[in-house]
Every structure is written in structure tokens, then in C-alpha cells.
Amino acid sequence: MRQAAMSAPHDWGMDVPAALIVADPARMAAHARAVAAGGARLVGQVAPAAADARIASQIALDLVIFDAQGMAPEPAADTAHALARWSTERGFRVVAMFDRAAIDTVAAPLLAQGATLLCEASAAEQAGALLAALPQPALRLNDATREREAERLRLLNEEVARLAEVLTQLAAERPAQMRDRTPDYAAEPSEEPDPDPRIVRATIRARRMREQFFRAELFADPAWDMLLDLYAARLEGRRVSVSSLCIAASVPPTTALRWIGTMHDADLFGREPDPTDKRRAHIKLTDHCANAMRGYFAATARAGLAAG
């Protein structure tokens, strides 16, 4: 009876966002309560195997909550790819929740869609992410959880935009115009040679060594840690999975995934498919970002400084 009441069309105005839950039946109730608390209209609850057909028949849809926690890798990956395709076609948002083991199969296909990716997140983190992902109707504008999440995302976007501007200036060796979250800027190729990848790896080891003497959270800098790891991998001719990059970030996986998504939006990171497994994708530096990293290591070498 409660579910029917939450889904009844006459209880909601047309401007209220419509949400669909894709999850194992045992996990649906908590998400349904979160949808109601967020001021959204629940239009359905389906098992992952039925998601594709349900979305195809749904007229209005603003948000899909996909809970892949505990799912086997193959069906979780298939559902994630279907949601990525539908999100591109229909323009709805996706909030995906999954275990660490599913980072590569679930997170990778959804990165380019701007999905909210939650890996082993707490109930509070899930509620905050859901509120932040919902379209902003006139009601609940003063919701404290939504405001905190929105502020955190704003600060993250600003930090990535600042980093992108610095990297662009390094690569181009001239002032650059930078706007938040715009991938249409270009950098001139650097004429500097690539450093020995062992130098980049030594830089990474030196950064990790600090944790033997200080608490790791004192030096949390996931953007730079990921840039270093991807640059070293590029020089070594290796591919980097999403899960491997999360480990390199040295922060909780949900935080790392948020950074990866924002760096992708800023055109610093790109995706490439796994040639042996269509369900997976790898992360790489974009060419202009790699040029900037090359310029940075060349500049520190010329100045006789150790890259940090």
C-alpha cells in the first residue's frame, strides 16, 4: 500500500522528478524511502534483468537508482551498459551503487554519462548523492543534505578547473583561457622529451613514503596522484583500469570515482575500451594533458628540482 501511494500520479505535480529503482527486491525498500524523502515520484521498482524493457516503456524518467551491490559481475556489467546507453538517449541521471569488485564492470561504462558512482558508500552518502542527483524542484530548496553535497561538488569542480588551467598553461607555455568543465581548449604540443618512466615512478614512491611518518589523510591529493599514475603508465605502454586508478588515488573509492568523473568532464582523462573484454574500459590521459605532464617534468629537471 505504501508503494502504491508513493507512485500514484495524483499525489504529485508534473514538475516532480520521476525515479526508477533497479535493484534486487530485498534492497528496494530503503531506496524507495530515500526517493520519497527526496521529494521525487517513484515510477517503478524492477530487478536488473528487467531494467532494459522497463526503461523502454517509461515515458517520463529523470533518475535511475541502480543498486548492483552483491550482483554477479556479468549481469551487473550488462545492466550498467544498458543504463549508459539509455542515459545518453533519454538524458536521465544515474546513481549507481556497487562493491569494490564491480568498479571496472559497473563504473567504467557510466563515467562518460556523468553518473553518480558510489562504492561501498554509507547510508548517509547514498542519501546525499540521491538528493544531489535529483532535479531541483521548487520544494526542498533549503534541504541541508542537498546543499552540502552541492557545495562539495562545486568545490571539486573548481579545483579540477584550476588544475586543468595550470596543466594547459604548462603544455602551451602561454596564458590560457579556462572555463569550468569545458573540454574545448587545446594545448600546443611540447617539444620536451618524455622523462624516463622510472623518474615518475620514483616520484610516486616518494609521495607514498610520507605515509610512513604522517597520517595519509594529511596529504590527500587524488587528482595529482592519478595524473602521475596515468602518466607513468602511458610512458610504460600499460593500460590502467578504473579500479587500479582508484587505488592510485589513495582515497576512498567513492571519492576517487568522483574525481575521475570530474577529470573526465574537464577533458583531462579519456576512456578506451578493453580490447579483450567489451564490458571493461581503461582510463588514459588526454594528449594535451600528457603534454602538460611532460612539460612539468622537463621544467622541474631544468630547475634542478625533484618532481613532487
Image (spheres, helix red, strand yellow):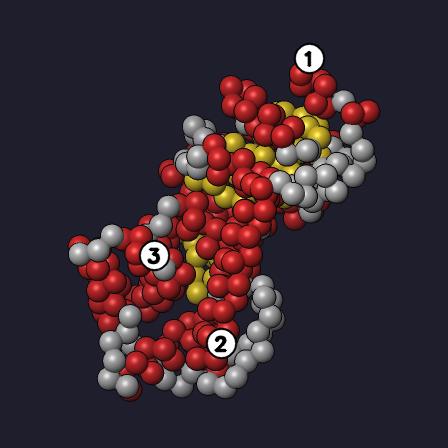
Q: Locate residue 31 relative to residue 136 in the image: left or right.
A: left
Dot 2, crowdedness within 10 Å: few (<14), some or many (≥20)?
many
Q: Amino acid at mark 1?
A: Met
Image height check: is 258 above or below 52?
below
The extreme left residue here reads: 212
- Name the N-terminal-most of marks 1 and 2: 1
SS under mark 3: loop
Q: Residue at x 38, y 57 (%)?
A: 222
- Of badges 2 and 3, nearer the viewer stands 3
Q: Is residue 213 left or right of residue 280?
A: left
Mark 2 lies on a secondary structure that is helix
241 or 31: which is nearer to us? 31
Viewer-nearest residue: 83 or 7:
7
| Residue 76 located left or right of residue 55 | left
* Mark 2–mark 3 CB contact (< 8 Å): no
Label whose residue precedes the other's in the sequence (1 or 3) = 1
| C-alpha gap between disc 1 and disc 2 | 56 Å
Q: Residues within 10 Å of mark 1 (few under 14, many from 20)?
A: few
The answer, for residue 280, to whether it is visible in the render is: no
Question: What residue appears at the point 41 percent right and 61 percent down from the top-left corner?
Answer: 223
Residue 53, by quadrant, is top right
Q: What residue did someone put label 1 on? A: 1
Q: Which residue is mark 3?
A: 220
**Residue 235 visible in the shown view:** yes
> Which quarter of the figure is the C terminus placed in?
bottom left
> Where residue 167 sits: x, y (%)?
45, 74
- Image coordinates of residue 187 in percent, x first then y, are 51, 79
Q: CA distance from mark 2 to mark 3?
A: 23 Å
User: Label 2: which residue?
Assistant: 168
Q: Amino acid at mark 3?
A: Ala
- Kind of element beneath mark 1: loop
